[in-house]
Structures are given as C-alpha cells and as structure tokens.
Image (cartoon, grey):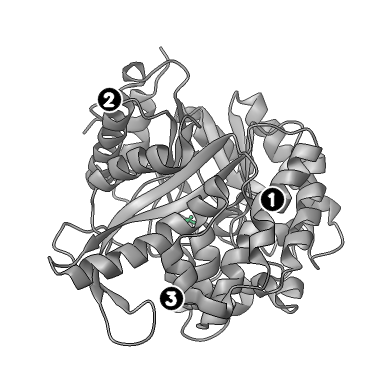
Amino acid sequence: MNFSFSRSDFPEGFLFGTATSAYQIEGHAFGGAGETHWDSFAATPGNVAKAENGARACDHYHRWEEDLDLVAGGNFDVYRFSTSWARVMPDGVNVNPEGLDFYDRLVDGLLERGLKPAATLYHWELPSALADLGGWRNRDVAAWFGDFTAAIMGRIGDRVWSAAPINEPWCVSWLSHFLGAHAPGLRDIRATARAMHHVMLAHGTATQVMRDLGMSNLGAVCNLEYAQPADQSPEAARVARIYDAIYNRFFLSGIFKGEYPAEVIEGLGDHLPEGWQDDMALISQPVDWCGLNYYTRKLIAPAPGPWPGLAEVDGPLPKTEMGWEIYPEGLHHFLTMVARDFTGTTPLHVTENGMAAPDRLADGSVQDADRIAYIDAHVTALRRALAEGVPVSGYYVWSLMDNFEWALGYDKRFGLVHVDFDSLERTPKASYHALAQALSKD
Ligand code: FCB
C-alpha cells in the first residue's frame, strides 16, 4: 500500500518530519540523569500498565546514531525531539555535563545528516527535586524552567532550527493535575488551575530567555481534540463548548491573545493564582510558529457533579489501538479555526499526528496498512486546508519508533519503526518504507 500524495504535491519549502520525546525513547537510567516525577508515578501501583517506566525505553541514549540514520533514510526534513530537564539538571539546579554533551552530539548528528533539529524543551519529565517543591503548582517553576532553558539552549541554541518550550500544556496541567492520568497524578482543581497558568508563565519565561540568547524560529505546541456534542441537546452543546475551552482554547488564547476564555475563568473561579492577569503580557509575547498535535475527537455529554459537569461518551467511528476515534475532518477544522481565530498569518505545523496499531513483526516485516491509511487521510485533510489558504508549513508523524507510551506502557505502538523491547532491534514498518517513497526528493 502506498500514500496518495508525494512531496511534489506540496508547496516549495513545506517540511515533513517525525517526532519523539526524551523520556519515551532515551533510557533515563543512563548518562547521569536525575529522578523524575514519571519514575515515581510509574513506581506507584496502578498508574502505568505493567508498572513499566522509561529506565531503558529504546536505549536511544546509546543508539542515537542508528536512530538518526532512520530519520534520514525516511527522507524527512525535520526531526522533532525533546530535551530532558532531569538529564540536563538532575537535581533541578546543577548542570550534568554528560546531559549537555548528549544533546550537543544529537544536534550535530542531525545537521551532519542534513536534518533540521526541532527542539522541545519539556516533554513531561519534571525533576523529582522540583516536584518535591510543588512542581507545576509552584509559581517558581517558571523561573526554574528559565534556568533550564538557559543551560540547554546556551549549549545547543546556536544550532537548533526551531524550539518550543512545552509540549502540550493541556497534558502538563489538566491531564496530570485534574484527571490524574499522568505524573504527578493529582485530582485537584486548585492544583490544576495553578498548573494551567504556571505552564503558560513557563512558556513565556523560556521564550524570553531564548530571545535573549538571540534565538529565532520559536514556537508553541498545543494538543487539540475536536469536541463534538454527544447529542442535539443544548446541554450537550454547552458542555462540549466548555470542553473545547479547557482543552483547545485556553492555551492558544493565552499565548496568542493574552487572555483566557471566559468559560474557564468562570469555572476555575478563585483557584487561578492571584494576579494572573499581570503575567499575560509575558505569556503572549510574539512567537514565530504554532504547532498543533492532533489525534482524535471526543463526544461530550453533560454529567452530574461540579464544574465542568461533563463526560466523554463512546463514539461510533472506527478506533485506533488507543480507543481513539479516527476523525481526519477534525484536523481540517483545527487548522482553519486556529488560523482564523488565533494565529492569522503565523505558520502552522502539525507537530504530531499518528496512530497506535496492533503491529506484528512477521518474517522481518510489519504490514501496517491501517497506519498508512490514517496518515494518508490526515494529510489529505491538511492539503484541503492548505488549498483554502491556511498557512500550514509542516507535518510531523508521531512517532519515529515504538516507545514508552506513558501510562499505557510499551504495548501501544505508534512507531514508523518497530522496536523489539527485548533485543531493542529496530525494523522499519511498511508505513516507513511507503513514506520514504512519497517523500523522496528525486
Ligand atoms: C501525545 C504526546 C506523545 C504521545 C502521543 C501519542 O499527546 O505528546 O508523547 O504520547 O500523544
């Protein structure tokens, strides 16, 4: 099976990439990295499938050269990776030279292969020493993050092609402090409100630090989920709008408009930190691009209980291994909506899109036609937005290779490359080969 598109269907300069994150692939036990809140979260019974963690992961820390060869061999232009705070500053304060050296080698390795390094500063593994001080609930997290930004970008900032401070602020705050599904596993509305604002403040602080270092091409990466009312009732429409405000509009609005949606301010009430309004200028300083991570939609229905008074309902569409409905129209919706309501002419990149599939290695190959179809449908939706004039500049597949899928452990395989988690052998799947062909520059 092949893709219905090829590179020549896109405007000159349109970029294709693939993405990973530090804790999910590197092997956190190696290279002097410090303990993170994901290690202790995973060590707590019931939080992560099979109590798996990122201690070894894909051993990318040692196998990075082979992995970068795979990125280059897939004919990608960009590699989106993240830098582990606890690898660079194991105790949250002092710098680990081995950590800086690792990212230095990685960036040079990318440049040597003709690939653009796209760095994300934080993809979720907070040093435990900072979690002990309250982590994202503590306003000081923004200044600590500024120190980390200065340390890592002081070393690689001269060579990265782009940088974004934080991957998916919704996950860092709501998923981790309200739903309790990710580290630190809290379920507390006050902690959530503080984390939501502090993650924005950390975004602004890091952006400022990087500007002061003379860096350019700085962005923000938000995850978006299409919120569909579960039925025709006005109540379902009302709560779907609240879901949309919390999930999709809060962070975009903070960064691109310097304000938060009224529905969320109303719902969070006094839980937002006092004086939050004074931070909005720092939070909404200009960025050069906006990244959208998109996977699925959710059907939303009213539910009893306090704000936000909503629940997700099982939907009828075909689903991926994650149980996520496949809804490419949602990507078209978000590209047009984000450009219209938030970003205007600022370039958009789809910084993550992909699916977990029940991949099986048989006779040395993985036939993942479902993944090819998923990516093809989403790229088609993207091309529709492009044809309508939306300034989309890039599309990145999540993920280069199978990895530690957070609370779901190693069972959910998102990779274009299969990883055997016993031998750590990498085997490119059919989707990888098909993409390499579609993206060929010849
Ligand atoms: C995104 C995360 C990424 C991965 C994918 C499936 O929300 O950024 O690390 O878990 O989902």
* Mark 2, residue position: 5
Marking on residue 282: 1
> Could you say whether the residue bearing mark 2 is in a helix, strand or loop?
loop
Residue in view at x 35 percent, y 66 percent: 243
Q: Secondary structure at mark 3?
A: helix
Along the horizontal axis of the image, is 393 left or right of 147? Answer: left
Residue at image coords 62%, 39%: 286
Q: Considering the image in quadrants, where does the C terminus appear?
A: top left
Callout 1 secondary element: helix
Labels 3, 1: front one:
1
**Residue 258 visible, this angle:** yes
Q: Amino acid at mark 2?
A: Phe
Dot 3, how many residues are within 10 Å of its Cα: few (below 14), some (14-19), or many (20+)? some
Check disc 1 and give the amino acid type.
Leu
Percent coordinates x, y for residue 401 in the rendering? 46, 48
The CB of the residue at mark 3 lies under 8 Å from ligand 1:
no
The answer to whether mark 2 and mark 3 are in CB contact below 8 A is no
Residue 49 marker = 3
Q: Earlier in the sequence, mark 3 or mark 1?
A: 3
Q: Amino acid at mark 3?
A: Ala
N-term mark: 2 or 1: 2
Query: Can you tell which of label 2 and label 1 is closer to the viewer?
Result: 1
Can residue 313 be seen here? The reply is no
Examine the image and state in which quarter residue 26 appears. bottom right
Q: CA distance from mark 2 to mark 3?
A: 37 Å
Query: 361 and 191: which one is in front?
Result: 191
Residue 50, placed above or below residue 285: below
Residue 326 vs residue 411, the one in the foreground: 326
